[in-house]
């Protein structure tokens, strides 16, 4: 069975059959359908090389586990879909940089560009991507990217400030913070925002109310248990991430403290679990989806390589829900 | 600047330079590094066609919003990574089937195979994928796939039974269910499991305690408010999904009911928010990650097309956490 015979039987030209095989869109649905049926009926399996591969935009994570990951994927997918590209997804390496096996793969895939969800990129990786003219952008919610690589982040200091001011504005004087890991710039920036808000409210910082967490639920739970068992316990906790805030809510439940009546809690990120918690969390929205969209757009319109790398920092803003209120009045 | 000149300057052969350019692994790291540096120093940008594209495994969703999505992606990524492939991700179509624009793209991408997270696949799509010998598998947590397409699901009836038996075993006699949408087979299967468990415990079903939800938090919240405001309110709710269970927890909080002391709640799915809730949810684990792994393996070892399509149904099992207890003793 030759393609010419399929064309004859379908009553179309050979180029039309070839268009159908190549997935071209300039064939009427009825014709496409007829040709497809005949190809299948005759057990046709293509052997000729196909059309050029469809364009990819690649996103690389060191762990897909993160609640961030889906928000970032959605942002890239939005831009990819509009530009006729497909999202390719890899998990590789450590929190710092993608693993060495990844670079071999990406050179073969030749994507339109790469979003790296990492803080730094090894020199060798940059060199190889540049020599193939594969543009790359760092999406770095942690906030400490290489200065010579284009990157997108968000305003961590301002976010820490807004979260803490919301609490001091309501009259809280004993406000604790569980920020992120000490080796991430975003943790330090949020902590500095917290300190500035306390200073603006005329409150002296209490170092016993400052904790470094790991951005996970369990860590938030343990720090909160410890903070809330103190005789001079805080009336509010700025939890540094939504997951840590969920851990704080569980610690409050276990200790029989009602949120927000006896304890106010502010999260950070505004990922979906913040809306689903009980009570729903007041939190700082980090525009993860928009960050990924901006990064994907930067890839599709690569900057002039002779100019300095672009750093975009998107604004964060407070979302007030039901986990915060004025502090309880002293008995 | 020619590649021959780069080879000369690096002190290697021209084929070695070409291997480096093509991302081949049979070059020593030191040589690769030297050649890469020279290529960059001389501003080399490749113009020749690259090596064949790296293999893709494609996964298509109608909405990435779902909490399922990340679990399924992780399963595919596990298998892809082991087999040297990359995950390509698309969002397209409706709950029933991918959109028409998707098929044109996938024929150009020519992935090793496609995981469709849909209940059905239009005949025209099946024909076109088959004629290009692109294998496909339906991953269908909803449980009503085409009989002629290989698919992976899980045991919904058994899951509904296990959730409800756990409650009747603890002595609950007024057990409500908020199952999923009425037009999904999985909702009906879980409801039938619930009914069988009640019958096994010698309890008559009360139709006023049966609700059809939408698998989202808000729907669970509204149904639970309504159920819990009844004078003869249930002492336990099987919530049909973890998100609906989170809505039930919020309804209990708003009404001042303590979980599990005054109300037991069982979820379904065991997605991460079930572990993060306050209290952590007793739930039925649907092995989403393993379902995606099985589906990806089916793609890589396509079945004999003359044999009947394979349907794999993985077991579900109850995970007991802190949202269930014996019913309160009557005053």
Image: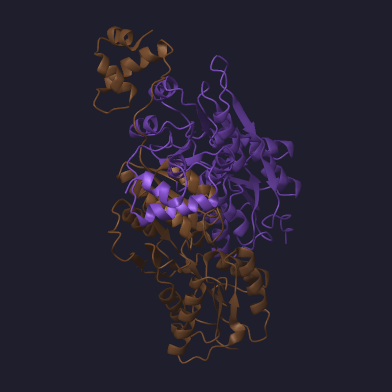
Chain colours: A purple, B brown
Task: Please tell me how many numbered marks the rendered image carries.
Answer: 0
A137 vs B245: above or below: above
Give x and y (percent) for residue A152: 58, 32
Is A37 on the left-hand or right-hand side of B233? left
Residue shown at 55%/14% (left/top)? A306
Give x and y (percent) for residue A196: 68, 35
In which quarter of the view is residue A240 placed? top right
In which quarter of the view is residue B107 placed? top left
Give x and y (percent) for residue B131: 38, 51
Give x and y (percent) for residue A252: 58, 60
Front-most of residues B3 and A327 = B3
Residue shown at 71%/55% (left/top)? A327
Front-most of residues A225 and A165 = A165
B129 vs A84: above or below: below
Residue shown at 31%/66% (left/top)? B308
B304 vs A136: above or below: below
B75 vs A104: above or below: below
Is B280 on the left-hand or right-hand side of A271? left
| Residue B313 shows in this picture | yes
Q: Quadrant of the N terminus of chain B?
A: top left
């Amino acid at each position: 069975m030759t393609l010419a015979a399929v064309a004859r039987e379908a009553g179309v030209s050979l180029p039309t059959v070839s268009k159908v095989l190549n997935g071209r869109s300039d064939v009427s649905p009825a014709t496409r359908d007829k040709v497809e049926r005949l190809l299948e009926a005759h057990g046709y399996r293509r052997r000729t090389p196909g059309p050029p591969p469809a364009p990819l935009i690649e996103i690389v994570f060191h762990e897909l586990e993160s609640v961030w990951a889906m928000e970032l994927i959605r942002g890239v997918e939005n831009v990819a879909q509009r530009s006729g590209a497909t999202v390719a997804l890899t998990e590789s390496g450590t929190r710092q940089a993608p693993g060495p096996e990844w670079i071999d793969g990406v050179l073969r895939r030749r994507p339109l560009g790469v979003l790296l969800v990492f803080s730094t990129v090894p020199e060798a990786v940059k060199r190889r991507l540049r020599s193939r003219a594969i543009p790359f952008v760092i999406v770095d919610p942690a906030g400490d990217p290489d200065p010579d690589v284009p990157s997108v982040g968000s305003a961590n200091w301002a976010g820490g400030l807004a979260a803490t001011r919301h609490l001091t504005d309501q009259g809280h004087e004993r406000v604790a913070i569980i920020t992120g890991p000490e080796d991430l710039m975003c943790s330090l920036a949020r902590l500095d925002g917290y300190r500035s808000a306390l200073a603006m409210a005329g409150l002296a910082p209490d170092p016993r109310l400052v904790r470094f967490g790991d951005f996970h639920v369990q860590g938030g739970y343990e720090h909160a248990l410890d903070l809330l068992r103190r005789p001079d316990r805080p009336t509010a906790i700025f939890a540094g991430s939504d997951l840590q805030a969920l851990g704080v809510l569980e610690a409050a439940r276990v200790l029989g403290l009602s949120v927000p009546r006896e304890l106010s809690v502010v999260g950070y990120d505004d990922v979906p679990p913040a809306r689903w918690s009980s009570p729903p969390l007041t939190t700082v929205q980090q525009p993860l989806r928009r960050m990924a969209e901006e990064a994907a757009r930067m890839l599709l319109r690569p900057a002039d390589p002779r100019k300095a790398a672009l750093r975009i920092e998107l604004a964060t803003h407070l979302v007030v829900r039901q986990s915060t209120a004025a502090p309880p009045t002293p008995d």
